[in-house]
Amino acid sequence: MDNNQQASSGTKSGLGSLFGGGAPGYSNTELAGVPLTGMSPLSPYLNVDPRYLIQDTDEFILPTGANKTRGRFELAFFTIGGSCMTGAAFGVVNGLRMGLKETRDMAWSKPRNVQIINMVTRQGASWANTLGSVALLYSACGVVIEKARGVEDDVNTVAAGTLTGMLFKSASGLKGVARGGVVGLALSGAYALYNNWDHITGSSSSSSRLY
């Protein structure tokens, strides 16, 4: 029996040395203290130190001078495209509603279908053009303000939203410009408030705990 145990242990040690050495000498206490978030528990017989598997840094390399987040210029393409698609979808739904409402007294026939389709395409193109133009103005103002100030913060968002509303209603006179600026200021301010809501609520809760 002793000879068999010695032979088996010799075989294991031989295989261990063949594949990179025997089992590492880590105790259960050391292995239990290693956080393995999102991973299955490692076998203590693996020839890998589990501490090396902890990722404390980012897994990508940024070019020199690049930011970790995309700037306004990179986000402009997504903003404009998304606004056009959103406007087109809303226009299609609105055109279908208007077409069915205007042709409700007509029987289901080819003229009614053509009229509904015309209404859908007209409304879809109109809303896509409107929201796309607003997104283009907002992105352009945001990029210019960011380059001018050299800082990316919520002030750029509010300023770009206000200028967008003023420029979009610039053909409606001074009152239209004022109304457009107020609307743009309100929408951009609400968006900035939404983005910083967690920070605001966290700061208020921490200050209330201090007092």
Image: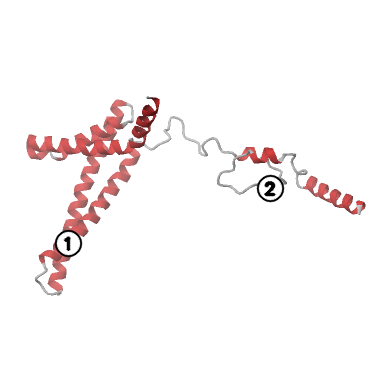
Q: Which mark is residue 181?
A: none
Amino acid type at circle 1 is Arg
Give the crowd class for mark 1: few <14, some 14-19, many >=20 residues within 10 Å: some
Quadrant of the drawing holding the N terminus:
bottom right
Q: Say which quarter of the image contains residue 155.
A: top left
Q: Residue at label 2?
A: 43
Q: Where residue 203 appears, x then y in whole percent?
A: 36, 30
Q: Residue at label 1?
A: 97
Q: Where residue 196 appears, x then y in whole percent?
A: 33, 35
Q: Where residue 168 appears, x then y in whole percent?
A: 16, 40
Q: Is residue 76 left or right of residue 49?
A: left
Along the viewing direction, whichever of 4 and 170 lies nearer the viewer: 4
Q: On screen, 196 above or below 11? A: above
The reply to whether the C-beta atoms of the residues labelled 1 and 2 are less than 8 Å apart is no
Q: On screen, 43 above or below 182? A: below
Q: Where residue 4 appears, x then y in whole percent?
A: 89, 54
The residue that appears at 74% across and 41% down in the rendered structure is 24
State how the image is colored: secondary structure
Secondary structure beneath dot 1 equals helix
Q: Earlier in the sequence, mark 1 or mark 2?
A: 2
Q: How many marks?
A: 2
Amino acid type at circle 2 is Ser
Q: Mark 1 and mark 2: span between their CA atoms?
A: 63 Å
Give the crowd class for mark 2: few <14, some 14-19, many >=20 residues within 10 Å: few
The residue that appears at 65% across and 41% down in the rendered structure is 32
Secondary structure beneath dot 2 equals loop
Could one spot residue 7 in this view of the protein? yes
